[in-house]
Image (cartoon, rainbow, N blue to C red):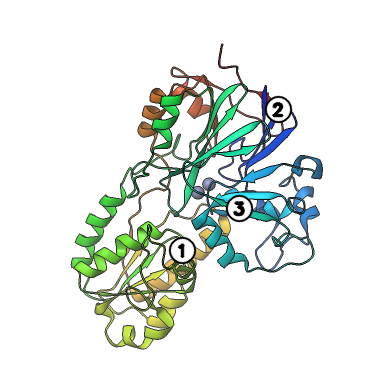
């Protein structure tokens, strides 16, 4: 019988997923992420980072060493709340992930091998998989299937266990551009699922259910009325959004420029045949190279920034008729809110209007309900949600919803029941 333990990412936390599956002697992690809310409660980037893994363990963000001894760790996608703590895994632990997330991790981490610490990854054995591959780990069979999310190379997993099939959704949405060649959810409903571990970011809160196509159409309209510089802030790894902006830049006859964090992502994914990211120097220009040109002719450019950066606003001093567009989620952590406030103060100084235009990286509630209805799992564990109780009330007529508590071990229902 398979046992499931949620070591983080539950009890109202969004992200920081750490799901341990135990089947006999076989143990695997599905994601080993870091919860940023918890991090900010105890640490600060650069100024007060943890000295090592023990600091993280002390504040309850990291499981004990014993729990980390696994046969393999599977990473659903390259957002830090799903992989950031793999550095804590013992020497030579196999870490399975898709090709795109591997390229992104390499670009962000470098290849440093050194003493074991919070930022050391050289001791791990990375293994890349592709959608539909069957991976056998002891008594478990794990199959990754690509899903649509706000970062390229996101996967959900179907795991064959002695208690039946287990579906872990990872983070996903159904309203983006990407249509997976094989749908994880169709596959799951076709095979039958006993246990579903399901994200619920958008359940229990106010949602603007825009699709990626809505963003494109609205952006087109807005830019046609923008007389001067357009600055768009987006998540640096949201390649689909960059492609949306690239299309709109083309139709509006503007050059597209971007700052470093975005270029790092595009460089890492350069040449990917399926993804076809904008080419640096051709489709998208480095901000550093064209700063003077933007200043000379602001109406000819769209500048993409990220992390609510105000530096470029300060440098470019957007002239009247310019526009700032927030094309990511609004900040919900205090530290980010302060950065966003600072940015807004600068924008007000120049009188630049601020618009918000975004399509969530996470499934909308009505789509989620449809999927659960189609798959008909015998039980469902809500995770990655601030409101697990709301998710229970939302889905309890369709399946048995079990709200997971941190550290507790759950036996999966048997498929015969
Ligand atoms: Zn997440
Ligand atoms: Zn994510």
Q: Is residue 133 above or below residue 246?
A: above
Residues at circles 2 and 3 in contact by the CB criterion of under 8 Å = no
| Figure quadrant of residue 409 | top right
- Disc 2 packing (10 Å; few <14; some 14–19; many ≥20): some
Q: Can you tell me whether the CB of the residue at mark 3 lies under 8 Å from the nearest atom of ligand 2?
A: no
Position above or below: 48 against 318 = above
From the viewer's perspective, is residue 192 above or below residue 18? Answer: above
> In the drawing, does residue 304 fall left or right of residue 5?
left
Residue 409's mark? 2
SS state under label 3: strand
Q: Quadrant of residue 258?
A: bottom left
**x and y percent of residue 65 in the render?**
80, 45
**Residue labelled with disc 1:** 236
Q: Position of residue 32 (x, y in %)?
A: 64, 46
Disc 2 from disc 1: Cα separation? 36 Å
Residue 75 position, x and y percent, is 58, 47
How far apart marks 3 and 1 lie (CA) works out to 25 Å
- Find numbered disc 1 in the image and state the secondary structure of the residue it sits on: loop
Q: Is label 3 or label 1 in front?
A: 3
The answer to whether the residue labelled 3 contacts the one labelled 1, judged by CB atoms less than 8 Å apart, is no
Q: Is residue 326 visible?
A: no
Tell me, for residue 127, which label it has, or none: 3
What quarter of the picture does the N terminus occupy? Answer: top right
Q: Secondary structure at mark 2?
A: strand
Q: Earlier in the sequence, mark 2 or mark 1?
A: 1
Q: CA distance from mark 2 to mark 3?
A: 28 Å
Say which residue appears at 69% left-offset and 60% top-offset: 121
Q: Earlier in the sequence, mark 2 or mark 3?
A: 3
Is residue 226 found left or right of 416 in the rendered image? left
């Amino acid at each position: 019988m398979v046992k499931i333990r949620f070591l983080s990412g539950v009890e109202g936390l969004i992200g920081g997923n750490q799901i341990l599956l135990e089947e006999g002697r076989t143990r695997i992690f599905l994601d080993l992420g870091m919860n940023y809310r918890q991090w900010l409660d105890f640490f600060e980037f650069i100024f007060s980072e943890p000295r090592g893994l023990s600091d993280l363990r002390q504040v309850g963000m990291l499981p004990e060493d014993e729990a980390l001894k696994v046969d393999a760790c599977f990473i659903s996608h390259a957002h830090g709340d799903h992989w950031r703590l793999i550095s804590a895994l013992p020497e030579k632990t196999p870490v399975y992930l898709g090709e795109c997330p591997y390229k992104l991790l390499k670009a962000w981490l470098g290849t440093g091998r050194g003493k074991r610490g919070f930022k050391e990854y050289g001791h791990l054995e990375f293994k890349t998989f592709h959608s539909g591959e069957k991976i056998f780990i002891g008594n478990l069979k794990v199959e990754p299937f690509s899903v649509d999310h706000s970062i390229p190379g996101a996967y959900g997993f179907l795991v064959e266990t002695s208690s039946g099939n287990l579906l872990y959704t990872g983070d996903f949405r159904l309203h983006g551009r990407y249509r997976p060649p094989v749908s994880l959810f169709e596959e799951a409903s076709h095979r039958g699922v006993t246990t579903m571990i399901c994200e619920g970011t958008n359940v229990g809160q106010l949602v603007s259910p825009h699709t990626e196509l809505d963003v494109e159409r609205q952006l087109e309209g807005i830019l046609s009325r923008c007389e001067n510089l357009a600055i768009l802030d987006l998540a640096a790894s949201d390649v689909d959004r960059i492609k949306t902006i690239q299309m709109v830049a083309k139709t509006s006859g503007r050059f597209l420029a971007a700052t470093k964090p975005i270029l790092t992502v595009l460089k890492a994914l350069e040449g990917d045949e399926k993804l076809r990211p904008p080419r640096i120097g051709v489709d998208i220009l480095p901000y550093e190279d064209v700063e003077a040109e933007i200043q000379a002719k602001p109406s000819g450019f769209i500048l993409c920034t990220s992390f609510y950066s105000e530096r470029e606003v300060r440098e470019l001093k957007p002239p009247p008729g310019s526009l700032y567009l927030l094309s990511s989620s609004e900040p919900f952590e205090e530290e980010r809110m302060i950065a966003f406030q600072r940015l807004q103060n600068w924008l007000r100084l120049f009188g630049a209007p601020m618009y918000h235009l975004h399509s969530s990286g996470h499934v909308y509630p009505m789509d989620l309900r449809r999927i659960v209805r189609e798959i008909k799992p015998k039980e469902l564990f809500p995770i990655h949600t601030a409101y697990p109780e709301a998710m229970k009330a939302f889905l309890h007529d369709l399946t048995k919803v079990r709200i997971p508590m941190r550290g507790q071990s759950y036996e999966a229902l048997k498929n015969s029941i």
